[in-house]
Image (cartoon, rainbow, N blue to C red):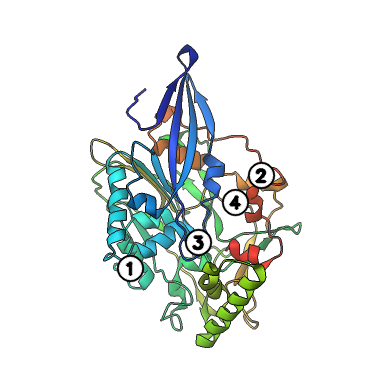
Amino acid sequence: MSTGSRSTFEKTEKNQEVRIIKIAILAEELFGWGSGKHFFPIILQDYTWKVNNTTYTIHTQYIYDKDILKGRLRTNQFDVLLVPGGGVGDGLAIIKGFQFSRKAIKWKKNISAFIRDGGGYVGICGGTALITDLKTAQKKPQTFVERQYHKSAIGVTCVSSYYKSLAFPLFFPFQKKHPEKIGAVAYAFSFAPGETVDGAQIHTGGVPIDFQIYHDHPITSGFDKDIERIRWWAGPALVVPEHPDREVKILARYPMQDLSEDKNIRIHAWKYVGGIYGLIRGFLKAAWYIKKEKDTLKNIFLYTFYMAGNWKKTDKYIELDFANKPCITTEVYPNEKKGRILLCAAHPEYMVWWNGHISEMKSDTFNCLGTGLYHWEGISPVSKHAKVELTHTWWMVRRFVAWAAKVPDDHLPPTHAEEEIHEKHPLLKNIFWDGSLLNQMENI
């Protein structure tokens, strides 16, 4: 076995070897916008498996922008940088798109140096958007969000993200005539809790999608199905160049039928009609709510965004244009250090569910993003403590980081593992709705 990795190796009795895989989890959430960063230590920290005479254990550590700027992301400290979506990946994609910022330039340079020096990178949803440039149906980014996502690219991957169009609801200046142009973002900020057929209320933003799995890669070669259900929450499709300058593999693709053609999950575009008055009223509601809940003032703008209204449903559908496009890719950086990059546009850390359909709220009442424009109905009953649904694709997360850390192909973690989920598990607040607006907004 090669010992060229930065991971810690320890010799034990009878020629047994222990390898510690060190994962840096980027945890810089911006704008009060939350993320699933707290899922990853639960999935990864101290996870251990054994192959032949080698025992592998994963250790995780949060790092922040200040750590990257101070040069603490180094290959002698970490094997892999994992970047979650939401307020981390997507939030940073917006901020790092300001190319005149010296800090943004240095930040990108230091992450690039880590990968060029042989470090691994795992991008989940927004973590994929952050590192890639952006292609759109218009060939050139048009909206503010599209331009920021495009300019956030770090310059180490040959893969691009793809959205037909992309804009933030509420702040899109052309939403009056073209509300559908917000694109996949419509699936990100606007879901009320869903309901199972036996009455359980669960947080169900986005869509659980049956992705096509390709088995010609070590990560998926041990998986015995051609389809895997993974949570999708407004992530991009991916574009692989026709003639890449490196080894690139596609591990999964979106379904052959576009999501926007499936009557169970397609949604109408809604448009904001509240004007300045609606924003002011939303701000006052947010301030009152923060005082009532003794919440932090840093959430004032996020809660204003959620509480501003009113919204009206239009007759236009959200179109994605993702059919059969790649969703998960791997690549090896083309130098002697061979840093590994894995991009995943979906969320294997989150729960999935089966059956059900998306319903839309009534348009003749007051609507805002905080209380939801859409919700899931008719979901199949979930298992005890949602154990099956919550842990369904955790195997992917573990194999992603192990591969990126250059664990030998035949030593990757198992594709099936017994998980322990108890009634006081910290993630259950992200699964079952407690009936409060705060818990609902925390899980949008």
Q: Earlier in the sequence, mark 2 or mark 4?
A: 4
Look at 43% across and 23% down and name the residue there. Answer: 10
Look at 37% across and 57% down and name the residue there. Answer: 130
Q: Tag on residue 259?
A: 3
Q: Earlier in the sequence, mark 1 or mark 2?
A: 1
Q: For residue 311, which quarter of the picture? A: bottom right
> How would you rate the neighbour count of disc 1 (Cα within 10 Å): few for under 14, some for 14-19, many for 20 or more?
some
Secondary element type, mark 3 = helix
Secondary element type, mark 1 = helix
- Asked whether disc 4 touches disc 1, contact meaning CB atoms under 8 Å apart, the reply is no
Q: Earlier in the sequence, mark 3 or mark 1?
A: 1
Q: Earlier in the sequence, mark 3 or mark 2?
A: 3
* Mark 3 to mark 2 CA distance (whole Å): 27 Å
Q: Residue furthest top?
A: 14
Judge left or right: residue 345 versus residue 444. Answer: left
Amino acid bearing label 3:
Leu
Amino acid bearing label 1:
Arg
* Mark 1 to mark 2 CA distance (whole Å): 40 Å
Of 287 and 416, nearer the camera is 287
Pointer 4 residue: 352
Q: Tag on residue 147?
A: 1
- Asked whether disc 1 touches disc 2, contact meaning CB atoms under 8 Å apart, the reply is no
Q: Nearer the viewer, mark 3 or mark 2?
A: 2
Secondary element type, mark 4 = loop
Q: Which x, y percent locates residue 119?
A: 34, 40
Q: Which x, y percent locates residue 418?
A: 62, 35
Amino acid bearing label 4:
Val
Pointer 2 residue: 387
Q: Is residue 354 visible?
A: yes
Instruction: Look at the image and tell me in which quarter the N terminus lies.
Output: top left
